[in-house]
Image: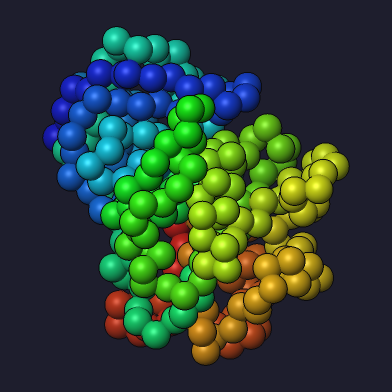
Amino acid sequence: MPTWLPATVVEHRPWTAGLFTLVLDRDVPFEAGQFLTLTRDPDGDRHTRRAYSVASAPGEPLEFYIVEVEEGAVSPGLGELRPGDTVYVSDKGKGLFTLAEVPEGATDLWMVATGTGLAPFRSMLRDGARLRNAADGTPEALERDSHVLRRFERIFLVYGARHSDQLGYVHELSALASCCPGRLTLLPLVSREDPGPDALGGRVTDRLRDGSLEATAGATIEPGRSHVLLCGNPAMIKEMQAMLEERGMVRHTRRAPGHLSYEKYW
């Protein structure tokens, strides 16, 4: 049973129907990439709480990027919260989906997310950085590189969703990428509509299979220089893992360093 801390909602930010960000006024220790657990009922059983990756960096107000699951036990209630409401959060971060668990040696880091699987990657990109915000609140420049940008020569952020309005944070991410040309590359994909000029069409796995993902990135995923972080839909993770294993990449564990790490979202 987690130790629960009360937190006040300071912002409910809707992206599109059933997709939102909650910002909480609470200081909780965690590492970028870890998750915390949320509940509206601290006396309830395990069905009344859910784990969510933190979308903000340590030291910032807590942000959670949440999709509302139809008939879900937790997310619809979280979607009802508004500024001033109280929600309960676990007292410390958990999970091994962090940069500290990525072995040394890779020069390229591929962050591959579907949907709200973006959350831990946003946390990593902001961790250690000082961001100067534009008038609309999006970061327009990096005053100091984040930890992940200092560690890797090149970062490729692959971000897939069904529709373009489900690519939450995409303007912020585009602004960050524009500050780091050649070092941070944003690769958005949409699978169920015309992607337009700024994204690829189709699923992440299809674009890896046909070569267009790497062609657009101007880089290849290979064991000698790449580490791949996968987060989001378990079907995507399973398929990506199988394709990358065909290239000689293996799952990373503490006992056996490898080239792939993942965080499944259900």
Residue 110 drawn at (x, y percent): 54, 67
| Residue at (59% x, 42% y) in the render | 170
Residue 106 drawn at (x, y percent): 44, 81
| Residue at (61% x, 56% y) in the render | 186
Location of residue 100 with respect to 21 vertically, above or below = below
**Residue located farthest toward the right when viewing the structure as drawn:** 194
Q: Quadrant for residue 246, please give it.
A: bottom right
Residue 173 drawn at (x, y percent): 54, 47
| Residue at (51% x, 84% y) in the render | 225
Q: Quadrant for residue 156, please give it.
A: bottom right
The answer to whether residue 260 of the structure is visible from this angle is: no
Q: How is the image coloured?
A: rainbow
The answer to whether residue 181 of the structure is visible from this angle is: yes
Which of these two is toward me, 259 or 197?
197
Q: Quadrant of the N terminus?
A: top left
Location of residue 249 with respect to 55 vertically, above or below = below
Location of residue 165 with respect to 245 vertically, above or below = above
Q: Quadrant for residue 73, please give it.
A: top left
103 on left or right of 242:
left
Residue 157 drawn at (x, y percent): 56, 59
